[in-house]
Structures are given as structure tokens and as C-alpha cells.
Amino acid sequence: MKYDALLKVLNELSAYLSEYKVISEGELILKINDCVKSLSDVEREGLERRLSGNLEDLIFKSITTREEKISVFSPDMHTKVNYQGEVFYCLPTHRYMSEELEEAFLRWARIRSPLSALRSVVKIFMERCGYQIKNEKRENNHLEMIALKDKNKHKRIHIFIFPSIKSVPYFIEENQVLSAASEAEAGERKVIVVPTEKTPAPFISFFREKNVGEAMIWVADVEKSTIDPFIGISEDEEIENNFANPKQARRAVSVWMKKMHFFEL
């Protein structure tokens, strides 16, 4: 067998990494796991005996470090970058990678926070608040739904679900739906729902760069199946009562705003 099986995995990883040039730690781990799963049990066991260790861990270290290479054919992405609270790896010769970093972040957001999981949290939350979900529409990078309370058109909420707060600016630039309201939408509240992030960094960046007008922004914690406010106050008392920690969430936003103002002085 020698290293034919290992070469097969490394070649697949090389092609994938060459395509993107920058990759999040989470996406890299998932891709390594997928490649290793393509091996037979015999191939995997043979490689782990030869290399003396867990195959996924050995491949990850081989790609992301200079010292622990397991093959001359191993991809080399030992340059490590922290961006928006996430860890990314890139080709050591690659420069001027702001666009690739942004794309890698959004790609990882779609993987780690699938719209289907966010939809489930939002649907349960809205139903608990007395709303029925109508007219769902899925786009490539977001999900839209209309929520009506007691079939009352005057208690209508247009919900936009995104895999990350970093996805929202692109939507705002391409659409006027968050700022423009037709007569049919008079009285309609608009809500953007995004998942939690590892750090406040993506939310702070959003605060600095974008304005969503009268729209509210809610943050969903998929693991806990909860929702909290980020921007805006709901006029519906039931919604306010069903947020997990609204006072704590709004206090955190206030602290971030003060810090931003201090650093901008």
C-alpha cells in the first residue's frame, strides 16, 4: 500500500485549498474528515500505524504547521490569521487577502449556521409569541418568511434570516426592501435574524458600517434554541417576554457602543 492512500487524500486537499487560498479552521477540519472517510478501514489503519497517530490530527498539523509535515506532497497553509473572532489559514505566499478572508468567513458561516437550523429556532419562537408563519421563500444566501398574529394583517412581521451578521451588508446593498415600504406593507415590521458569533467583532463591524433603518435585528442561539434582541425594540409584549435575556443583550450593545465611541475619539 505504501503511501498511495495518503497521497490520494493530500491531492484532494491540495486541489480544494488551491481553489480558495484562505480557509477557516472549522472548514479545514470538516474537509479533512470528509477526505479521510473516503479511505477504507484497512487503508486508514495502515496509515495510522505507519504515521503513529490519529490520521485527521496528523494531516491537520501537516497542513497548518512547518514542523510536523507527514509528506512532501502535503499542502502548506501554515500562515494563521484571526479574523472576526475566527481562525483562518492561508497560503504562505498569498498576500492582500481581505476579499478571500471575507469570502472564507461567509462560507464557514453558511456551513456552521445552516438556514434550516435558524429557521427552526425562529419558527418555534414566533409560534410561542402567537404568530403563524406564512409565505416562506428561500434565496441562495438567506430565507424570508411572513409572520401574522391572529390573522391580523396589522400585526405582520417580515423576517429575513441570514447565516451571519456579515451577510447582511451585501443584502442591504443589493435590495431596498429593508428601507422601502409599499402601501401593502404599511405597518409591517421588518426583522433580521442572525446567529451568535464567537466574539462581538462581527456585530461591532456591522454597527460601524451599516444602518438598517427601522428594521430590528435579533440574534438566534441555535444550540440553546433562544432569540435575543440586538437592535430595536418590539411593540409586541409577547415577543419581548419570550426573548431569553433582553435586558442583558441590550446592556451589552450599549457597552459596545460606548467602547466604539471611545476608540473613535
Image: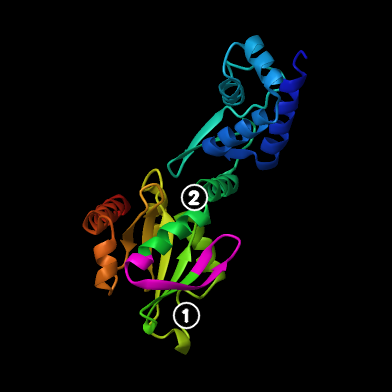
Q: Position of residue 104 (x, y in %)?
A: 57, 45
Q: Which label is found at residue 113?
A: 2
In the image, taking residue 254 as reference, residue 110 lies left or right, namely right
Q: Earlier in the sequence, mark 2 or mark 1?
A: 2
Is residue 118 in view? yes
Q: Please state the extent of the stretch shown in magenta in the rendering.
A: 126-144
In the image, taking residue 186 as reference, residue 244 lies left or right, namely left
Q: Position of residue 2 (x, y in %)?
A: 76, 13
Q: Let me know if residue 165 is in the magenta part.
A: no
Compared to residue 24, the image places residue 211 above or below, namely below
- Mark 1 — residue? 180
Q: Position of residue 255 (x, y in %)?
A: 24, 52
Compared to residue 198, the image places residue 240 above or below, namely below
Q: Which label is found at residue 228?
A: none
Compared to residue 28, the image places residue 167 above or below, namely below
* Quarter where residue 231 is shown: bottom left
Is residue 233 in view? no
Query: Distance of mark 2 from mark 1, alpha carbons?
Result: 28 Å
Which of the two residues, 246 or 265, is positioned nearer the viewer here? Answer: 246
Which of the two residues, 240 or 186, is positioned nearer the viewer here? Answer: 240
Question: How is this picture coloured?
Answer: rainbow
Could you tell me the amino acid type at mark 1? Answer: Ala
Q: Quadrant of the N terminus?
A: top right
Q: Position of residue 166 (x, y in %)?
A: 48, 55
Could you tell me the amino acid type at mark 2? Answer: Ser
- Name the mark nearer the viewer: 2 or 1: 2
In the image, taking residue 256 as reference, residue 132 lies left or right, namely right
